[in-house]
Image (cartoon, rainbow, N blue to C red):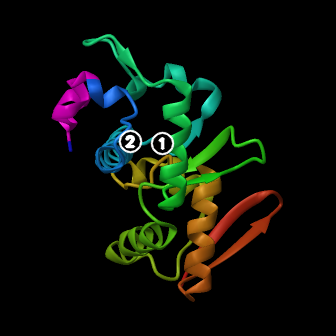
Amino acid sequence: MSSTNISDISWYYDFPPFFTLQPNLDTRRKQLDAWCSLVLDYCRLKKIFTFDVNDAKKFPLFFNTKINRQLDNNFIQVLLEELRSRGNIEWQDKNKRHCLVLWKSIEEWAKTVHHWITSRGMNGTVCTFYELLYSDDTLSAEFHKIDENLFRRILMELERRGQATVFSDNGAEGVKFL
């Protein structure tokens, strides 16, 4: 998906009723399905890994200037709850203001990282989190600049599978890929 225009991702984004929570349950289900797909596609495209509810009104996806429509707070809450119930967001605080966006599951991310490591013959290599997240070597990697908390969880999943050992030394976190 190389487009950066939201309308190119979804034809229904420019359809005004798309921005109003539909009262008919069947229609609402289809609407929420479409919104969930759109949010996840947009986050994948823009490499968005966290979301702050306090900034929801500023989130470009939730306001369509072309048709002058935006999601109201209730719709945003319904949408976020739907994403949570599907396992696509995880709240990071008790007040449900900050969440981790999972457009891939932790298991899928672990496969992605493991494939990247093995395809480069890096098994047995020790790397710092910083190297893996921010170095020029990982520029083309899907996990480049991923949220550090999410990355830690991915590496813990790899450790659980016996494919990595995660460690900390003098405040620097690292991983050895097995």
Residue 29 shows up from this direction: yes
Q: Is residue 46 left or right of residue 94?
A: left
Magenta span covers which residues?
A: 2-16
Circle 2 crowding by C-alpha within 10 Å: few under 14, some 14–19, many from 20: many
* Residue in the picture at 61% in, 34% down: 52
Q: CA distance from mark 2 to mark 1?
A: 9 Å
Q: Amino acid at mark 2?
A: Val
Residue on which disc 1 sits: 79
| Labels 2 and 1 touching (C-beta < 8 A) | yes
- Residue 14 location, x and y as percent? 21, 23
From the viewer's perspective, is residue 138 above or below residue 38? below
Q: Nearer the viewer, residue 123 or 149?
A: 149
Q: Is residue 6 magenta?
A: yes
Comparing labels 2 and 1, the label whose residue is closer to the camera: 1
Residue 177: % across, % down: 54, 79
For the residue pair 88 and 120, the one nearer the viewer reads as 88
Vertical arrangement, residue 1 with respect to residue 104, above or below: above
Quadrant including the N terminus: top left
Q: Identify the residue position indicated by label 2 in the image.
A: 39
Residue 141, position as x, y percentages in the image: 37, 55
Kind of element beneath mark 2: helix
